[in-house]
Amino acid sequence: MSGTPAVFLNASNALHGGLGLVRTGDIAIVVSNSGRTDETLQVAQQLNELDIPVIALTGDTQAPLAQPADVVLDASVTAEACPLEMAPTASAAVTLAMGDALAMSLAGRRGWSRGDLARVHPAGPLGARARGQ
C-alpha cells in the first residue's frame, strides 16, 4: 500500500531457497515475538551475510534476535488475550499495527499520493476514492 514492493517470506521457506528473492537494496523486517526461534535467528544471520539491513520486530528486545538486527522495535505486550496467555493474540495485533505504522511512514517519506494509490488500486471503492469519484 506504500508503493514499495514487498513479499512475505516465512523462515522455513527462506532457509530452503526463498532467500533468492532478496536483492541488494532490500530491507528485511524479521518478526518473532520471543526473538528466540532457531529458524528466525538463522534467517536474520543469513540476511546479515547478504548485507541486508534487518529490522527486528519482537516482544523481547533483549532476545538473541536483537544481536543481528540493525534496528530493534519493541512489540511487547503485558498479556495475551488467549485465556492460557500463550497464543499470540494481543502480540499479533501489535505486530500488525507496527507493520502498518512502518508502511505508512514509508509512504509519507516517499511522497505517496492519491494518484499513486489510484494507479495501483484501480478497482473497488478505495480506488474510486483515490480517483476522487
Image (tube, rainbow, N blue to C red):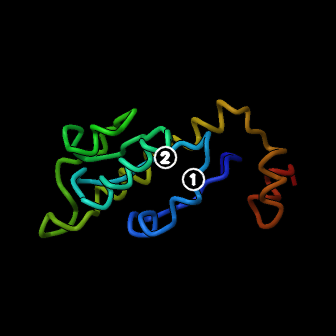
Which residue is the site of mark 2? 28
In the image, residue 130 lies at what x, y percent? 80, 50
The local crowd at label 1, few if under 14, some if 14 to 19, many if 20 or more residues have their Cα within 10 Å, is: some
Work out whether residue 14 or residue 81 is closer to the camera in this orientation and state it.
14
**Numbered mark located on residue 22 in the image:** 1
**Numbered mark located on residue 82 in the image:** none
- Kind of element beneath mark 1: loop
For the residue marked with disc 1, what is the amino acid?
Val
In the image, residue 72 lies at what x, y percent? 34, 36
**Image quarter in which the C terminus is found:** bottom right
Up the image or down, 28 lies above or below 73; here it is: below
Task: Residue at 37% x, 52% y: name it.
Answer: 31
Please identify, in this view, whether the residue under mark 2 or under mark 1 is nearer the observer. 1
User: Cβ–Cβ below 8 Å for labels 2 and 1?
Assistant: yes
- Does residue 113 appear left or right of residue 32 in this picture? right
Task: Residue at 25% x, 47% y: name it.
Answer: 59
Task: Residue at 59% x, 59% y: name it.
Answer: 21
Which image quadrant for residue 123?
A: bottom right
Marks 2/1: CA–CA distance: 9 Å
For the residue marked with disc 2, what is the amino acid?
Ala
Work out whether residue 132 or residue 67 is closer to the camera in this orientation and state it.
67
Lower position in the chain sequence, tag 2 or tag 1: 1
- Does residue 87 appear left or right of residue 54 in this picture? left
